[in-house]
Image: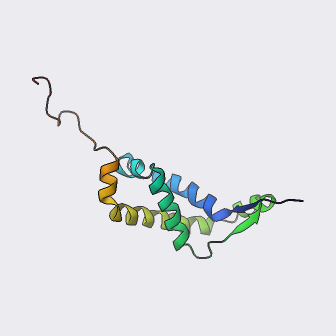
């Protein structure tokens, strides 16, 4: 019988990234990491900094491991926060060119008098 292998860390990382980003402001963090390139960079960052990154199980063992992942989840959450800050700092120029600036109402010059 054929069994499918599942990378638990990758699934945990993706769900933790979404949860952690919800706690950050929409602009610029959520907008920046909505860009697929930066989101993937964040996943790779966490995987590269996560000890024992190869936690693979078969599909039918997956439900057992989900219940025992609290410590791993906290470790991943910490790395996600670090990754967000590191990537944002390293790529700040690139990010500023790829997401629009927030303009507050009343602060933009009027085009009324053209």
Question: Which residue is painted at 31% across and 59% down in the image?
Answer: 92
Where 35 falls versus 61 (above or below)? above
Q: Quadrant of the C terminus?
A: top left
Q: Is residue 64 left or right of residue 8?
A: right
List the single residue furthest toward the bottom: 51
Where 113 falls versus 69 (above or below)? above
Nearer to me, 86 or 19: 86
Question: Which residue is painted at 34% across and 54% down in the image?
Answer: 95
Q: How many marks?
A: 0
Q: Is residue 53 left or right of residue 112?
A: right
Where 101 falls versus 54 (above or below)? above
Question: Which residue is painted at 38% across and 49% down in the image?
Answer: 25
**Quarter holding residue 93:** bottom left
Q: Is residue 21 left or right of residue 92?
A: right
Q: Quadrant of the N terminus?
A: bottom right
**Residue 13 on image: x %, y %:** 57, 60
């Amino acid at each position: 019988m054929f069994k499918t292998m599942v990378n638990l860390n990758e699934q945990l990382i993706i769900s933790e990234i979404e949860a952690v980003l919800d706690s950050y402001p929409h602009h610029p963090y959520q907008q920046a990491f909505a860009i697929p390139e930066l989101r993937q960079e964040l996943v790779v960052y966490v995987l590269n900094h996560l000890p024992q990154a190869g936690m693979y199980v078969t599909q039918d063992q997956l439900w057992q491991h989900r219940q025992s992942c609290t410590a791993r989840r906290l470790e991943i959450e910490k790395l996600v926060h670090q990754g967000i800050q590191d990537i944002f700092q390293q790529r700040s120029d690139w990010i500023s060119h790829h997401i629009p600036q927030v303009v507050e109402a009343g602060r933009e010059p009027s085009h009324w008098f053209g």
